[in-house]
Amino acid sequence: MRRGVYRLDGGDGPASAVLDHTLRARAAAPGLSSEAVFGHVTAAVLLGLPVWAVPLDRLHVVRSRPTGARTRGDLVVRSGTLLSDEIVDGGGLRVTGPARTLVDLARSVPTEQALVVADGALQAGAVAARTGRPRPDATTPGEIAAALTRATGTKGVGAARRTLALADPASESPGESRSRFRMHVAGVPAPVTQWPVPGTRFRADFAWPDLGLVGEFDGRTKYGRTLRPGADATEALWEEKRREDRIRRTGLSVVRWTWQEITDPGPHGMITTLRQALRT
């Protein structure tokens, strides 16, 4: 992986891009200068934040100096002001903290990709506040605002402000973040997120309560996350159908979409389906 650094093949199939990026960062760390700190998407990965469609072919580090930015092989070195309270521990490596990482990403990657990471960090912050257990990936709106203030005058900070203004701590998955962003771009009325359905114990991913409509992102991975011991995906899908039936019995309409339908411009795409349902 680096000169003198090897990875043992466990024989469990190819590593994911995130795992490969993590291992490459660990392999590179001993060869970096003492002032170098992992940042940008590498910090997001090492903090355990969700990353979607951000290239992971290069490692990113930040050095606190006015000049000296360069790209060498698979290593991108960024220069700029880096304060001591913006550095945290990311699995034993020095990384930029969540708020600083979000601002750096939002300054340099498209809004949709940056929003996935931002929502994940704010969701982690909400969970940490609710449970009283600190998390390395957690941040708050106040911390993000402070990081944006520090970034005033830097390239891309305007885009970062616009992106991070869209972040929502109630978003629980990249699919929900992407769905909300696509609604925003298409001019669909802003939904209420994680809305408690009256008369049930359920929450809807998205809701337009005044119009009697709820929306659900149908991501397959969520069934795996909610499986009970001994249960299987078929049972989870059946439970999801029963859940939807109960929501419909309250008089609400339900619209569902999949990962592929988030950006599908056709008649079965998320935006087209939502617009029809909202008109109805």
Image: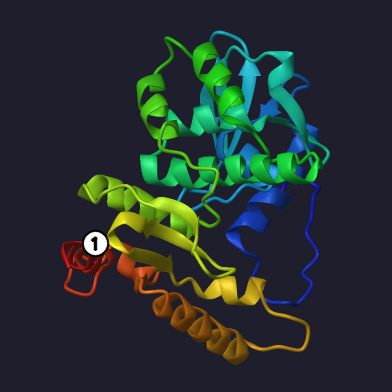
In this rendered view, identify the residue nearer to me: 101 or 121: 121
| x, y percent for residue 68 | 55, 15
Residue at the location (54% across, 50% down)? 51
| x, y percent for residue 189 | 26, 49
> In which quadrant of the rendered view does residue 39 lie?
top right
**In this picture, residue 177 sits left or right of residue 231:** left
> Is 167 above or below relative to 173?
above
Residue at the location (40% across, 78% down)? 248
Number of numbered discs present?
A: 1
In this rendered view, identify the residue nearer to me: 40 or 85: 85
> In which quadrant of the rendered view does residue 78 lie?
top right
| x, y percent for residue 216 | 42, 67
Q: Quadrant of the C terminus?
A: bottom left
**In this picture, residue 25 sits left or right of residue 114:** right
Residue under pointer 1:
271
* Mark 1: secondary structure: helix
Q: Judge whether residue 1 can be spotted in this image.
A: no
Q: Judge whether residue 126 can be spotted in this image.
A: yes
> In which quadrant of the rendered view does residue 261 lie?
bottom left
Mark 1 residue type: Ile
In this rendered view, identify the residue nearer to me: 43 or 272: 272
Residue at the location (48% across, 80% down)? 246
> Is 163 above or below relative to 68?
below
